[in-house]
């Protein structure tokens, strides 16, 4: 830890370090490389580590001091997996099944222009529900995103899911462009903060694009243990990071 400030610059992935579900640019990699000499760096995203490697490179774990795939429910220090919790152990099979059955029925009743496959994706730490289906093409994804802004498909589904399953302590939030993230309450991005305590970090700056209420960066952005910075995409992240680095120098 010598030579570096005990400050963590923590980044959301989609829409912050990379365009949604796309690859990191050289510009962002260079920014990370340069600031890592001064501060600690980490990433936190809803996706699992395999997807994050596709986006940020096979070497991404070694590239960051801390990696928090699946909101930090999996925790890596460099390349070492330190901890991993599982969604199903907390929710239980019966409640999970009830939520899946309800969601499939709900999805079968909504009329949207295109439906593809993988409407519900089961992950270690969360479930991801997508009205169009995760196997849609890039163009279909883009069209759904626009359609969703206009007709509030995900927002309305989240309202309904909350009404029914809040009692089970399940949290629903709009993730990226085509889906809804589902996890136990408290397993939003604030989950990852517990891992850095005790590792000498004194301050955390969080950079994220979905910081509005209902967005999946909202909870950590508002958390009092964190200084939140709202960004409008990877280029804006680079700009704002350099501004912050100047301020703390
Ligand atoms: O990291 C943001 C989100 O990225 C994906 O969302 P979508 O496919 O809807 O753009 C998902 O991996 C989601 O879980 C994640 O929160």
Image (tube, rainbow, N blue to C red):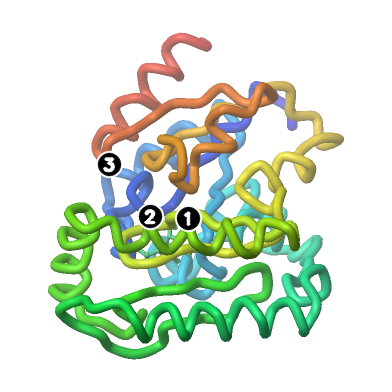
Q: Quadrant of residue 125?
A: bottom right
Q: What residue sits right under mark 2 in the picture?
A: 155
Secondary structure of residue under mark 2: helix
Q: Position of residue 40 (x, y in %)?
A: 61, 35
Tell me which corner region of the image, top left, top right, bottom left or bottom right, holds residue 119. Answer: bottom left
Instruction: Determine the quadrant in which ligand 1 lies.
Output: bottom left
The foreground one among 167 and 74 is 167
**Image x and y of residue 32, in percent:** 43, 40
Query: Would you name the residue on which mark 3 appears?
Result: 233
Total marks drawn?
3
Q: CA distance from mark 1 to mark 3?
A: 27 Å
Is tag 1's residue or tag 3's residue first in the polypeptide sequence? 1
Q: Is mark 2 within 8 Å of ligand 1?
A: no
Give above or below for 142 relative to 50.
above
Q: Residue at x 28, y 56 (%)?
A: 152
Asked if the residue at label 1 sits under 8 Å from ligand 1, the reply is no
Q: In the image, 239: left or right of 181? A: left
Q: Secondary structure at mark 1?
A: helix
Image point (63%, 28%), residue name: 223
Mark-to-mark CA distance, 2 and 3: 22 Å
- Callout 1–callout 2 Cβ contact below 8 Å: yes
Residue 54, position as x, y percentages in the image = 41, 72
Check the picture and name the quadrant holding the N terminus: top right
**Does residue 123 appear in the picture of this structure?**
yes
Relative to residue 165, is residue 20 drawn left or right?
left
Q: Earlier in the sequence, mark 2 or mark 3?
A: 2
Q: Secondary structure at mark 3?
A: loop
- State the residue position of label 1: 159
């Amino acid at each position: 830890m010598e030579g570096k400030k005990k400050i963590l610059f923590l980044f959301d992935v989609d829409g912050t370090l990379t365009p949604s579900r796309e690859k990191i640019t050289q510009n962002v990699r260079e920014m990370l490389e340069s600031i890592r000499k001064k501060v600690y760096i980490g990433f936190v995203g809803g996706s699992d580590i395999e997807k994050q490697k596709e986006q940020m490179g096979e070497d991404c774990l070694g590239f960051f001091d801390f990696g928090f795939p699946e909101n930090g429910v999996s925790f890596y220090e460099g390349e070492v997996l330190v901890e991993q919790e599982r969604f199903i152990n907390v929710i239980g099979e019966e409640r999970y099944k009830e939520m899946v059955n309800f969601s499939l029925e709900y999805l079968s009743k909504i009329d949207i222009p295109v439906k593809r496959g993988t409407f519900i994706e089961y992950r270690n730490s969360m479930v991801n529900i997508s009205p169009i289906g995760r196997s849609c093409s890039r163009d279909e994804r883009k069209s759904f995103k626009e359609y969703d802004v206009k007709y509030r498909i995900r927002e309305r589904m989240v309202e309904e899911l909350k009404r029914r399953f809040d009692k089970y302590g399940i949290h629903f939030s709009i993730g990226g462009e085509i889906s809804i993230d589902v996890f136990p309450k408290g397993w939003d991005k604030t989950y990852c903060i517990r891992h850095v305590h005790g590792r000498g970090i004194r301050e955390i700056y969080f950079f994220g694009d979905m910081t509005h209420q209902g967005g999946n960066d909202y909870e950590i952005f508002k958390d009092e243990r964190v200084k939140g910075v709202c960004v409008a995409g990877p280029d804006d992240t680079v700009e704002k990071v350099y501004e912050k680095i100047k301020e703390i120098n």
